[in-house]
Amino acid sequence: MALTDFLSASDITSAINACRANDSFSPKKFFAMVGLSKKSPPEIEKIFMILDQDKSGYIEQDELQLFLQNFSKGARPLTAAETRAFLLAGDKDGDGKIGWDEFSNLVMSS
Ligand SMILES: [Ca+2]
């Protein structure tokens, strides 16, 4: 299963290009551009499972840092500031990682 099973390749390219500069990444803007916000909860859950690369049930900081590379292998890693901001935006219970419910809330609000 790949993200391109759910999202259009041209939307992915546009979303990646829009945050090419360091510190220009915004999770909500990216989710909207890539078309994730319009997906159904079951589709968002499958996408979450792809982003949770080690299948721990959470998207941890190291996975957040390499978040863009799930969409495009050549994409840049997020900067430390972007990774922290992404975590803060999603991690409502403060456990330092993003669970499924937190991810879907963040996606739905974008
Ligand atoms: Ca994980």
Image (spheres, helix red, strand yellow):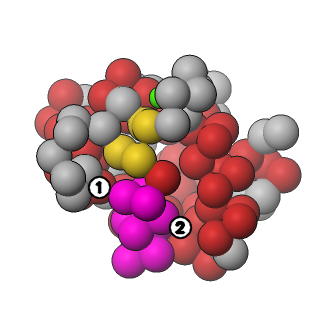
Cα separation between marks 2 and 1: 18 Å
- The amino acid type, in three-letter code, at marker 2 is Met
Q: What residue does disc 2 label? A: 33
Is 50 inside the magenta-drawn segment?
Answer: no
Q: How crowded is mark 1: few (under 14 residues within 10 Å), some or many (20 or more)?
A: many
Q: Quadrant of residue 58?
A: top left
Numbered label attached to residue 108: none
Left or right of residue 87: residue 56 = right
> Quick one: SS at disc 2?
helix
Q: Residue at x 79, y 49 (%)?
A: 4
Magenta: predominant secondary structure element?
helix
Q: Nearer the viewer, mark 2 or mark 1?
A: 1
Residue 50 coordinates in the image, percent (x, y): 65, 38
Work out whether mark 2 precedes mark 1 in sequence or the reverse, and give the earlier one. Answer: 2
Q: Which residue is drawn at 64% across and 70% down?
A: 41
Residue 21 in the image: above or below residue 42: above
Q: Which residue is drawn at 48% across and 64% down?
A: 104
Q: Evaluate if marks 2 and 1 touch, with contact meaning CB atoms under 8 Å apart.
A: no
Residue 21 coordinates in the image, percent (x, y): 32, 41
Residue 22 coordinates in the image, percent (x, y): 27, 37
Q: What residue does disc 1 label? A: 90
- The amino acid type, in three-letter code, at marker 1 is Gly
> Quick one: SS at disc 1?
helix
Q: How crowded is mark 2: few (under 14 residues within 10 Å), some or many (20 or more)?
A: some
Where are the magenta residues, as a range? 101-110
- Image quadrant holding the C terminus, namely bottom left
Residue 85 coordinates in the image, percent (x, y): 18, 47
Residue 46 in the image: above or below residue 22: below
Left or right of residue 50: residue 87 = left
